[in-house]
Image (cartoon, helix red, strand yellow):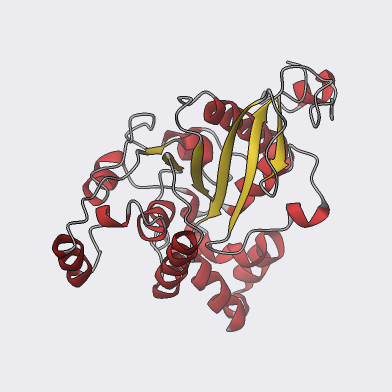
Amino acid sequence: MDCPAHAVFPTSRPPPEGLRCKTVHLIRHAEGTHNAAELEAERRQRFMKREEWRALRETHGVAFYLLESVTGLTYWDPPLTRLGRRQAAKLRRELTRSNVTFDAIFSSPFRRTLQTAMIGCPQIECLHRARPWWRKLGAWLRHEPCRPPPVVTTDLLRERIANYTSDGRRTVTQLAAEFPRVNFGEVSEEDRPFLESKELGKQEQPLVRARARRAVQWLMDRPTQQRTVAVVTHSHFLLALLGLFRLPDEGLLRFANAERRALHLCACQNDAQEGCDPTCTSAAAAAEKPP
């Protein structure tokens, strides 16, 4: 496939005429318990407790604390912290003030991303089981029906798949019990990618970039009426996705927890269109395909 097949444009102005586009709001999940644990372990220098932990930190950095050999399965598919819930609530207020509404919400099938979506997106907050009773009562008294856009999960939007327990997720049965109105139809019951499709070592970057390309195509293949969408995902994946496009350096900075960035994502019909000139060769694109 010639590269690129898609281009992005800032939302400060309309996208070029004649292109098929979606307005995509990229959102990183709010703080999870694993994020807090990494920071706390580093602050307390817990790697100093054992010689093998020191060696693991040399190899993995602060993420060593999320290895099963260090903390077991404590951080398997971790939920949001209290701070994370406040961050998601701040996101909800920001979206409300900006009068942003979504035609669809796409998320990785993880608790932290789904909780961020449920709390952070005003249109679907009503679906969140942990929503305070007084909010539910207030909505009922104001005759505010719960009419959310579809929430769809896909493993294409998951975090880079490494050996950290936070990269694994619960079964679909468990997730569906916590998030009953979410569509898990495109996700396998067990977390097969974590067990079978690691993105490690020298292959990490090309594998994640190849998955990001598939995710972009998946987004553009969604129904045309889904023009403004939210994508709730993870930091490493977001950097890989944005790295597919020619952006200013500030556009490639790491996302903070619950940070949102909006852009127009458009399908290129020919290389002569604005923003659609080739930025990589077919050989480079082929080199990024998984073996």
- The residue located at (70%, 37%) in the rendering is 8
- The residue located at (15%, 66%) in the rendering is 137
In the image, residue 157 lies at what x, y percent?
A: 52, 40
Regarding residue 225, the answer to whether it shows in the image is: yes
Above or below, comparing residue 125 to residue 83 in the picture: above
Q: For the C terminus, give its image quadrant.
A: top right
Closer to us: 40 or 256:
256
173 displayed left or right of 149: left
Closer to us: 104 or 118:
104
Above or below, comparing residue 238 to residue 86 in the picture: above
Which quadrant would residue 198 be assigned to in this image? top right
In the image, residue 202 lies at what x, y percent?
A: 74, 39
Q: How many marks?
A: 0
Which quadrant would residue 290 be assigned to in this image? top right
Q: For the N terminus, give its image quadrant.
A: top right
User: Which residue is most to the bottom?
Assistant: 44
In the image, residue 284 lies at what x, y percent?
A: 82, 25
Closer to us: 266 or 48:
266
190 displayed left or right of 156: left
- The residue located at (64%, 35%) in the rendering is 265
21 displayed left or right of 125: right
Above or below, comparing residue 234 to residue 259 in the picture: above
Regarding residue 161, the answer to whether it shows in the image is: no
In the image, residue 169 lies at what x, y percent?
A: 40, 47
279 displayed left or right of 100: right
